[in-house]
Image (spheres, helix red, strand yellow):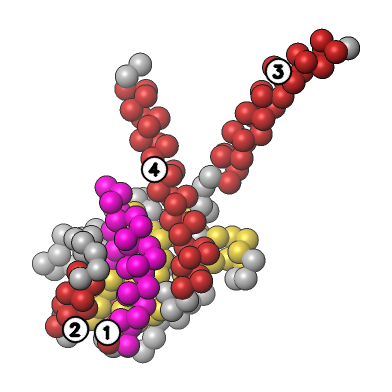
Amino acid sequence: MKKTFILVVLFVLPIVAYLFFASGVNNFGRLPVLTENIRELNVVDSEVKFKDHITILGFLGSSVDNRKGNAFNLNQKIYKRFHEFKDFQFVMMLPYGAEEKSKELKEELATLADVEKWHFVFDSPEKIKAVFESLQTDISLGEDLGSPYVFVIDKDLALRGRTDDEDDGTKYGFNSSLVSDLNNKMVDDVKIVLAEYRLALKKNNAERTK
């Protein structure tokens, strides 16, 4: 009996533990797709696209000064943490006329971090609304075409979020006015999406070397 017990501890338990954790990666290692086929950016004089990028999408609107705090929260809590990932980017949509204010904001952000992957995209109200509506969320865009919420868009133009959030049920976006929302939820969700692509890249590289 003693030998049998030792064999179980040495050989069977590690296998069970491996299967348990492997199952955990499969079950919990992906962030749900909430909306597919997000409207792609098609902006004159801009090469910024959602396709093949992991994008944090925001809508600063025409009242840029009123959302500086949101931008700084995102810069400190999300951007600085993840911006070195190759295909990661921030895209902020604004209506024409907000160029000067956004330039000032970007210069202020640049004093705190390398802002190469902060993209400010300007378009007509109609096209901004079209992109926002393609997300198909329960969140409304303000009259100034802005929102405190930001959204995670994957490389295949799909909105990622939570289907069983303890506070919101289905969680489409993250409130950049609330540091707690960024710290307690968004950081984890962005980590998951980035990990998905890292694992996929490693798998592809391994298959090429076979």
As measured in the structure, the alpha-carbon distance from the residue carrying label 1 to the one carrying label 3 is 61 Å
| Residue type at the position of mark 1 | Val
Instruction: From the image, tell me which residue sits under label 1.
Output: 64
Residue 110 position in % (x across, y down): 19, 69
Q: Quadrant of residue 89?
A: bottom left
* Label 4 close to label 3 by CB (< 8 Å): no
As measured in the structure, the alpha-carbon distance from the residue carrying label 3 to the one carrying label 2 is 64 Å
Judged left or right of residue 2, residue 102 is left
Circle count: 4
Instruction: From the image, tell me which residue sits under label 2.
Output: 101
Q: Which label's residue is closer to the chain start, 2 or 4?
A: 2
Is residue 81 shown above or below 135? Answer: above
Q: Which label's residue is closer to the chain start, 3 or 2?
A: 3
> Quarter holding the N terminus?
top right
Judged left or right of residue 115, residue 162 is right
- Identify the magenta region: 66-91
Instruction: From the image, tell me which residue sits under label 3.
Output: 10
